[in-house]
Image (cartoon, helix red, strand yellow):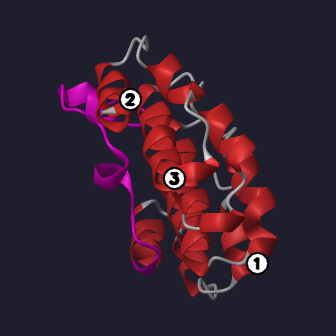
Amino acid sequence: MEHKGDEQPSLNDTGQQHSLEQSTVPASLLPSVLSRLGLEDMTSLPLTGVDTQLAALKDDEIAVRVAAVRSLGEHGETSTLGPLVAALHDSAWEVRAAAVWALGKFGEQAPLEALMRATDDEDGSVRAAALRTLELMGDRVTIEPLVRALGDSDWQVREIATLTLG
């Protein structure tokens, strides 16, 4: 399918199942991504700094925001929890799903309430990512979001809930 103008292509446009793993860019590739997006002037920035990654959360390009979220999750600095929780409200599902995974990397420090709210996201991929992340939290999580997910409109979400509940 051809895309016109500034429209962002989505894996859904090709009829493929979209997943976070297929749609993210490792932080190490951020300079290349920025260059391809016509943002060469940003490639000279020190991209390993948390401040730069936090600034990238406000970029217009989805791929840049996703890369920043993933990188912040890899750093695991608790000072980034607030901005990562805020990324759960991004307009792009890819960024919200990346934020779920990034928050999950914090383990015991992960904000459960924010992750629980993500199970009600408008996008099935975000809801599925939230359920998978909560599943990894073990006993810290109540069964309620899994039971509720059994009636979800997205088959992936229902499948995750079913498999998790066993």
Image coordinates for residue 78, horizontal then vertical, percent: 76, 73
Marks 1 and 2: which is nearer the front? 2
Q: Are marks 3 and 1 in contact (CB under 8 Å)?
A: no
**Disc number at residue 138?**
3
143 displayed left or right of 53: left
Crowdedness near tag 2: few (<14), some (14–19) or many (≥20) residues, C-alpha within 10 Å: many
The reply to whether residue 93 is in sight is yes
Q: Earlier in the sequence, mark 3 or mark 2?
A: 3
Residue drawn where x is 55% and y is 31% of the image:
143
The three-letter code of the residue at mark 1 reads Asp
- Residue 20 in the magenta stretch? The answer is yes
Image coordinates for residue 8, horizontal then vertical, percent: 42, 37
| Quarter of the view holding residue 92 | top right
Image: 114 above or below 119 = below
Q: Earlier in the sequence, mark 3 or mark 1?
A: 1
Q: Which residue is mark 2?
A: 161
Residue stretch in magenta: 1-28
| Quarter of the view holding residue 10 | top left
The three-letter code of the residue at mark 2 reads Ala
Q: Which residue is mark 1?
A: 51
Number of callouts? 3
Q: Main secondary structure of the magenta part?
A: loop
- For the C terminus, give its image quadrant: top left
Residue drawn where x is 38% and y is 29% of the image:
161
The reply to whether residue 106 is in sight is no
- For the N terminus, give its image quadrant: top left
51 displayed left or right of 148: right
Residue 163 vs residue 21, the one in the foreground:
163
Image coordinates for residue 106, horizontal then vertical, percent: 62, 68
Q: Are marks 1 and 2 in contact (CB under 8 Å)?
A: no
The three-letter code of the residue at mark 3 reads Gly
